[in-house]
Every structure is written in C-alpha cells, then in structure tokens.
Image (cartoon, rainbow, N blue to C red):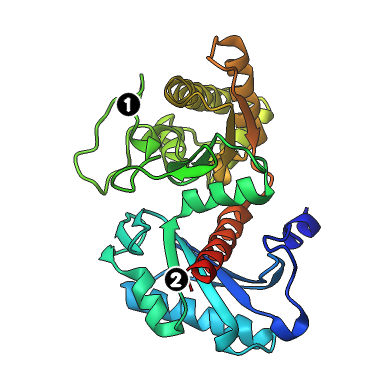
C-alpha cells in the first residue's frame, strides 16, 4: 500500500528531468494536527512533515507552522523556495475555493472569513489554493484510491464529525455557498434534533459521529468496559458485546438511511467510506448488508477507502498539481 501511495501516476505527460525539478506541496490542516507532503510534478511524494496544532489560537500561528513545514521539506530535498510551484491546503470547514477563504469552521478556534490562500501566498510567494478537507479526500480517492477514475461517487468522511465530498461528471460539486456535503446536519428518524447554534454538531453527526457514539455509550451507564473512541466500541461489537452491537446496528442503520437518501437525489453508483469511524470493517460490512436488503435505486456500491488517512493529503497534492497546470496554461 505504501509503495502505491508513494508512486502515484504522473499527471504530466513526461516527468521533469533532474535539471528541471519543480515541486508542489499539500497540507491537511486539522483541529489537532497539521500534515504536509512535498511532491515533484509527476506526483511522487518526496518527503512529509507534521506537527501538532493543539493550543494554537488564531490563523497567524497556523500559517507560520505551514510555511515553516514547507521550507523544512524543501531544505530536506536540497531545493530552494523558488522551485515550489504551488500549495493546496485542506481545511475542516466551509471554504470559498475561488477566493481562498476559510468561511467558517468549528474545529479551528476563531476562524471566520480567513483569507488563508492570500496569506500563504504572501509568505511563500507561490499560488495557494484552499478547499474543504473532505473534498480534498474525494480528490485523493479519485486520483489514487477506491474511486480511481470514477465519474460519479460520494466520499463519506465519518470521524469526529461527518461530511461528504460529492463528485459528479468527474468534478467536485461544492454548492452555491461552498457548503455542499454537510450531511452531518441531516435529519433522520432518531436524529431529529436541530442544533440551536452553528457551533453545535448536526443531528446526524451527534448520533453517528465519533463523539456522538461515545456519548451514547456513556448514556448506557456501562462501567465494565472503558473506551476512548468509537472504533473501540465497534471492536467490542466484533467480540459480541451486546451493547456495542446495539450501537453498531444503530449507527449502520442511520448511515444506510443517509446513503439511501443521497442515492435518491444523486443516483451515484459508488460510496466510499473514510474517516476513523467510517473505515471500521464492522460498520462497512453492516451497511453493505443493509443496502443489499433494501431496494436502493441504482444498487450503489459501498466500499472502504484504500488511502485511509492519506486521502486528504494526496487530494491536496493533486489539487496543487492541477492548479500548477492551470497557471501554466494561463501564463
């Protein structure tokens, strides 16, 4: 798997020669971690860099971490900053892609209408593009993962939160206000509570997101099994724990209902499950069995991500490569 990830198919007709080496950078910015990767113009990852974002307040500190990491990676491959062609950043929230603005996010404290693209460009002096991290993951999966070359599919990221990256006719569908795919706010039976503020988790997220599953586990007043995350609960379900099996069935049912509803609207033939919760084999198997029993239009296929946590990072690299090619055409 690692060899497949590190040797992604070239996006240029011919890989650059040693004398012509240029680079792109990709960033996956989360509420607790920042991960970066540097690739050449053939898409081959040359090095990675990561750091914690815990305790950072405000965009300035995060921007400095991003730029520091990019410079560190370039130094590692003995390249000057002038050889960097572009950078793409995936962020956990709504992003205005055209203007490089982080509109809103509940995972980065104090971020509202932050012109992240322009701020990064001024620091690194290269084009910087910004998009939602789940959209980045969808780009990665279509490039080198479970949805490779698929024209229509939905990537479902189920971790602490829930989001969807929607690809139609080979292009990401972002919506009129860049908020397409916010399925964590879906209203389903058993998840009909509407959040009173924008900072609260959505109805579906509060039930089958990682924190939602943990909260329900605690409500069962279980003292004999201590768990630190939702995947441990699903592990207990595989061992036959009856309460864990109940939560697994409930989570799978609600996720299957969401997939069913999305299928009715988009008629997509493929759904890719990602995120720490979505990748769990027990959840995917349960959803596949339920969909098999339901009469879902188009009989969509549900598979797990083959890129795992690298989907966002690879998607950001692909986005950076695509933006580089666009700039070349315009210059």
Query: Is residue 225 at all visible to an observer of this figure?
Result: no
Q: Quadrant of residue 291?
A: top right
C-alpha separation, residue under disc 2 versus residue under disc 1: 36 Å
Q: Residue 55: percent from the left, percent from the top?
A: 38, 71
Category of crowding for the residue at label 1, using alpha-carbon neighbours closer than 10 angstroms: few (below 14), some (14–19), many (at least 20): some
Query: Is residue 271 at all visible to an observer of this figure?
Result: yes
Asked which secondary structure carries label 1, the reply is: loop
Asked which secondary structure carries label 2, the reply is: strand
Q: Which residue is mark 2?
A: 128
> Can you say whether 293 is above or below 130 in the image?
above
Q: Which residue extends farthest right?
A: 3
> Can you say whether 70 is above or below 239 in the image?
below
Name the residue located 47 percent from the left edge and 69 percent from the top edge.
Answer: 330
Identify the mark nearer the N-term, 2 or 1.
2
Q: Which residue is mark 1?
A: 187
Going by the image, does 69 lie left or right of 200?
A: right
Q: Residue 147: percent from the left, percent from the top?
A: 64, 40
Q: Say which of 52 and 243 sits in front.
A: 52
Q: Residue 192: percent from the left, percent from the top?
A: 29, 25
Going by the image, does 113 lie left or right of 1?
A: left
Category of crowding for the residue at label 2, using alpha-carbon neighbours closer than 10 angstroms: few (below 14), some (14–19), many (at least 20): many
Q: Residue 6: percent from the left, percent from the top?
A: 74, 62
Name the residue located 76 percent from the left edge and 82 percent from the top edge.
Answer: 18
């Amino acid at each position: 798997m690692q060899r497949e990830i590190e040797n992604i198919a070239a996006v240029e007709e011919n890989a650059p020669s040693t004398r012509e080496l240029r680079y792109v950078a990709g960033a996956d910015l989360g509420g607790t971690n920042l991960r970066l990767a540097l690739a050449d113009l053939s898409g081959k990852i040359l090095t990675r860099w990561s750091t914690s974002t815990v305790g950072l307040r405000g965009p300035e500190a995060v921007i400095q971490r991003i730029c520091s990491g990019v410079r560190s990676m370039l130094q590692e491959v003995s390249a000057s900053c002038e050889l960097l062609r572009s950078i793409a950043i995936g962020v956990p929230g709504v992003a205005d892609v055209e203007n490089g603005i982080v509109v809103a996010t509940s995972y980065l404290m104090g971020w509202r209408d932050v012109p992240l693209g322009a701020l990064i460009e001024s620091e690194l002096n290269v084009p910087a593009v910004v998009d939602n991290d789940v959209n980045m993951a969808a780009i990665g999966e279509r490039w080198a993962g479970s949805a490779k070359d698929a024209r229509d599919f939905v990537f479902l990221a189920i971790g602490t939160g829930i989001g969807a990256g929607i690809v139609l006719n080979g292009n990401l569908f972002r919506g009129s206000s860049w908020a397409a795919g916010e399925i964590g706010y879906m209203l389903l039976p058993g998840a009909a509570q509407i959040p009173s503020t924008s900072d609260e988790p959505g109805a579906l997220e509060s039930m089958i997101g990682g924190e939602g599953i943990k909260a329900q586990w605690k409500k069962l007043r279980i003292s004999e099994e201590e768990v630190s995350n939702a995947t441990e609960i699903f592990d207990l379900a595989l061992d036959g724990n009856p309460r864990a099996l109940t939560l697994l069935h409930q989570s799978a049912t609600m996720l299957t209902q969401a997939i069913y509803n999305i299928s009715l609207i988009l008629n997509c033939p493929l759904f890719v499950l990602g995120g720490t919760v979505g990748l769990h084999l027990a959840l995917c198997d349960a959803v596949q069995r339920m969909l098999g029993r339901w009469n879902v239009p188009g009989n969509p296929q549900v598979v797990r991500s083959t890129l795992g946590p690298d989907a966002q990072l690879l998607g950001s690299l692909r986005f950076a490569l695509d933006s580089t090619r666009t700039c070349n055409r315009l210059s």
